[in-house]
Amino acid sequence: MKKEDKGLLIDSLVESLKEYAHYYIVDLTALDSAVTSDLRRECFKNEVKLQVVKNKLFIKALEKIGADVETLKPVLKETTAIMFANVANKPARIIKDFGKKNNGMPGFKAAYAEENYYVGAEQLNTLVALKSKNELIADVIAALESPIMNVVSALENKENKAEEAAAE
């Protein structure tokens, strides 16, 4: 590969790293082309970008954005693909669901999600359980709404009782 081509690929990876808040490093080694195409379609449906990369070029892109390369270097071996997403748990859910149908593949190596690094296959369940920003906001609204609804309900009950007492 020409040096200019490598530079363009690194720049493309840097743009993706800037565009997407979260990325997952996965192993696609055991997937044939048909299954890989299915995975790409699943990613596309879920607004996740899947890109196969050369490890050294990805390391250079990470260095360009100032990421902690030393944490990820141990997993950047063999065939690597990157899943870019703006919702932290979407790639984890895809990996887990797709893996159930395909003998545990794609293999999870590491991720950068919610401003933290997760390294090792045992971290996948943690990532699946991560709530997105919108899910957290919905939880807070539901928590705030519940006491208000109780007060409104209690006031309505008192009003109904007062009306019943006046009717008697």
Image (spheres, rainbow, N blue to C red):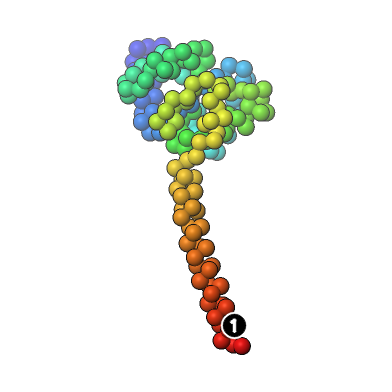
Assign the C terminus to one quadrant of the image: bottom right
- Residue 3: where, in percent of width, then height? 35, 12
- Where on the picture, by quarter, is residue 102? top right
Query: Is 77 situated above or below 131?
Result: above
Residue nearer the viewer, 133 or 162: 162
Q: How many marks?
A: 1
- Residue 59: where, in percent of width, then height? 39, 16
- Residue 135: where, in percent of width, then height? 49, 45
Assign the N terminus to one quadrant of the image: top left
- At label 1, the amino acid type is Glu
Residue nearer the viewer, 117 or 47: 117
Would you call the spot at circle 1 few (<14 residues within 10 Å), some (14-19), or many (20 or more)? few
Q: Left or right: where does residue 92 sit relative to residue 8?
A: right
Rendered residue at 38%/28% (across/down): 17
Residue nearer the viewer, 27 or 50: 27
User: Looking at the image, can residue 28 be seen?
Assistant: yes
Rendered residue at 36%/31% (across/down): 18
User: Looking at the image, can residue 11 be seen?
Assistant: no
- Residue 107: where, in percent of width, then height? 57, 21
Query: Is 157 situated above or below 85?
Result: below
Secondary structure of the residue carrying numbered label 1: helix
Rendered residue at 44%/31% (across/down): 113
Q: Left or right: where does residue 49 sit relative to residue 70?
A: right
Rendered residue at 55%/38% (across/down): 45
> Residue beneath label 1, please?
164
Residue nearer the viewer, 140 or 108: 140
